[in-house]
Image: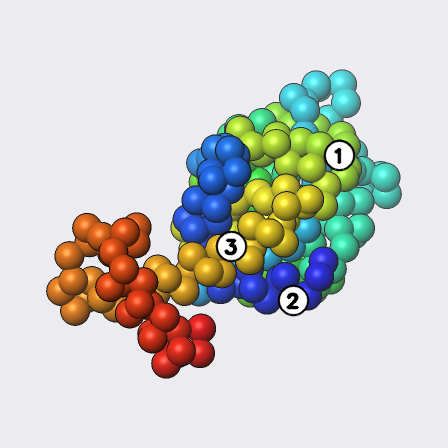
Amino acid sequence: MDEALREKLKGISVATLATALFKRGLRNQVIQGVQPVGRKGRNMVGPAFTLRYIPAREDRNQLSEFRKPSHPQRVAIETCPPGHVLVMDSRKDPRAASAGDILITRLMVRGVEGVVTDGGFRDAATIGELAIPAYHTRPSSPTNLTLHEALDLDVPIGCGDVAVFPGDIIVGDDDCVIVIPQAIAAEVTDEAVEMTAYEDFVVERVKEGTPIIGLYPCTKDEHAEAFKVWRAEHGR
């Protein structure tokens, strides 16, 4: 991932990115139902590396599966590239865990940027204390083998009702997670940087008592001129 793009995205909220994508006709890019296990006060930003689960079948999913070096869940933990975000399609089913604190710790040590599942994590309290950003629907204790079979790596998946393709840019803040199609990531980011600057200006004005009509969105020349002065003063 272009590091300049990553740095820009670290300072943009998911809400602002959602608006920039909506302007391009993309209405369904926020992964539904997921939230941070523990808020980090910073953005998670990285390309998607994907893992797909399917419903487990009893003749294929015993604890002995974890002994196999080729088990896709274990392979995902060891091959997700540093700086990427591991995104798991757990079928929106948190009744069995997508992973636990040992595997997430391994991702963190390997330099992976973050992890997202539309299922749940076991050992969630411990995961929430790790430095790596992690997002799920709720805590879940049963092993994934009880309900999920890890099957495919680095393929298109659905996570929280959003299509995720390998290499799509994933951004998570202290609220939620959004998926930016790789092909338009740069233009969306540049527009969102501009939007963020104006929104910061608006917040200051609203706190000072300025009415919102004509200010947000900007439909009055006086606010446009004041914003130019504000940008110069703040180096934005």
Can you see residue 187? yes
In this orientation, does residue 141 appear? no
Q: Is residue 110 left or right of residue 36?
A: right
Residue found at x 27% / y 51%: 219
* Type of amino acid under label 1: Val
The disc at residue 4 is 2
Residues at circles 2 and 3 in contact by the CB criterion of under 8 Å: no
Q: Nearer the viewer, residue 236 or 95?
A: 236
**Residue type of the residue flagged with mark 2:** Ala
Q: Mark 1 sits on what residue? A: 155
The answer to which image quadrant residue 156 occupies is top right
Q: Quadrant of residue 159?
A: top right
Cα–Cα span, label 1 and label 3 = 29 Å
Determine whether, in the image, residue 236 is placed left or right of residue 183.
Answer: left
Which badge, 1 or 3, comes first in the chain's sequence? Answer: 1
The 10 Å Cα crowd at callout 3, few under 14, some 14 to 19, many 20 or more, is some
Residue 24's label in the rendered image is none
Q: Is residue 170 above or below residue 205?
A: above
State the image coordinates of residue 25 (x, y, percent, origin top left).
51, 33
- The residue beneath circle 3 is 191
Q: Earlier in the sequence, mark 2 or mark 3?
A: 2
Tag 1's secondary structure?
Answer: loop
